[in-house]
Amino acid sequence: MSGGLWVVMGLFWIVLITAIIWLVVRLLPSGARTGATPVTASGPVSPQLPSPLEILDGRLAHGEIDLETYQAHRAALVAARGGQ
């Protein structure tokens, strides 16, 4: 190969690798690139965590606790919240 073809081949590989890196970066979610919390017009977006009562309900539904334990824990949670 002549010298001109080596330059063309080198430029081809540089362009190809750059295009692959650009594509991978573009396909990543924006939060993964920056590590920032997504923000909307109403403020920062945070994942919704289940409430203690929802966790307790789930534990009963999955059979992790019996009904008596559920009722005791639920009464304690409701009392701690001020009877809500």
Image: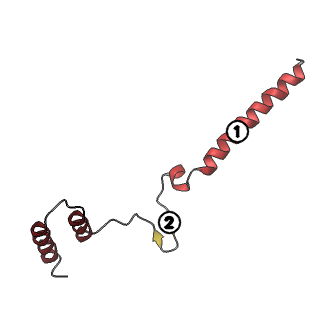
Q: What's the colour scheme?
A: secondary structure
Q: What residue type is labelled 1?
A: Thr
CA neighbours of label 2 inside 10 A, class few (<14), some (14 to 19), many (20+): few
Find residue 48 and report its horizontal and vertical position in percent: 37, 66
Q: Nearer the viewer, residue 69 or 50?
A: 69
Say the numbered circle drawn on residue 29: none
CA neighbours of label 1 inside 10 A, class few (<14), some (14 to 19), many (20+): few
Tell me which residue sits at (15%, 72%) in the image.
74
Q: Name the residue under label 1.
A: 18
Q: Is mark 2 on a helix, strand or loop?
A: strand
Tell me which residue sits at (48%, 56%) in the image.
36
Q: Distance between the residues labelled 1 and 2?
A: 30 Å
Q: Quadrant of residue 10?
A: top right
Find residue 29 and report its horizontal and vertical position in percent: 55, 54
Q: Is residue 74 left or right of residue 61?
A: left
Q: Name the residue under label 2.
A: 39
Mark 1 or 2: in front is 1
Q: Is residue 8 left or right of residue 26?
A: right
Tell me which residue sits at (75%, 31%) in the image.
13
Q: Which amino acid does label 2 sit on?
A: Val
Q: In which quarter of the image is residue 8?
A: top right
Q: Indicate which disc, 1 or 2, sits on the residue closer to the N terminus.
A: 1
Counting labels gives 2
Q: In which quarter of the image is the C terminus?
A: bottom left
Q: Is mark 1 on a helix, strand or loop?
A: helix
Find residue 25 and report its horizontal and vertical position in percent: 61, 47
Q: Mark 1 touching mark 2, by CB under 8 A?
A: no
Q: Quadrant of the N terminus?
A: top right
Q: Is 9 situated above or below 24? A: above
